[in-house]
Image (cartoon, rainbow, N blue to C red):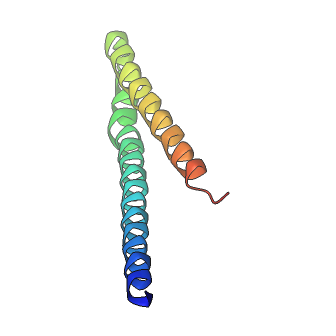
Amino acid sequence: MLSATSARFFTLVQIAITILLASGFLMLALGLLMIELYSHILWALYPRLQRAMAEQDWPLVGAVLNSIRQRVRLNLGLGGLVFVIAVLGRDG
């Protein structure tokens, strides 16, 4: 009886640990992706935007702004996903 109860307990603990690790890795991966998107905007797209504006290359300005907009929208969506995961993972 005690052996069967212990076996069920440790099985449930293993499942809980697996879920905890998976959700932690997911949150870490999403956070790293969001940082990468922001870094790309800051270090690649924004300087390209500044150069295009200085050269008054308005078609390029529009294209770069569109690229920035798309990445910001994706980052906001990822942030919303992180929020949903965090809320759903809260204790009661």
Residue under the point 33% across and 30% down: 48
Total labels: the figure holds 0
Establish if 88 lies above or below 65.
below
Image quarter hosting the C terminus = bottom right
Q: Residue at x 37, y 74 (%)?
A: 11
Residue 66, percent from left and from top: 39, 19
Hey, which residue is sitting farthest right in the picture?
A: 92
Residue 75, percent from left and from top: 45, 37
- Front-lying residue, 12 or 75: 12
Does residue 12 appear anywhere in the picture? yes
**Quarter of image, res 13:** bottom left
Q: Residue furthest bottom?
A: 2
Camera-nearest residue between 25 and 62: 25
Is 20 situated left or right of 55 in this image?
Answer: right
Residue 41 x, y percent position in the rendering? 39, 38
Q: Residue at x 43, y 52 (%)?
A: 31
User: Percent x, y for residue 77?
Assistant: 47, 33
Task: Name the residue at 55% across, 55% down.
Answer: 89
Of residues 16 and 69, the one drawn nearer to the viewer in this rendering:
16
> Can you say which quadrant of the picture contains the N terminus?
bottom left
- Is residue 53 in sight in this rendering? no
In the displayed structure image, the side of residue 85 where residue 41 appears, left or right = left
In the rendered image, the residue lying farthest to the top is 59
The quarter of the displayed image where residue 51 is located: top left
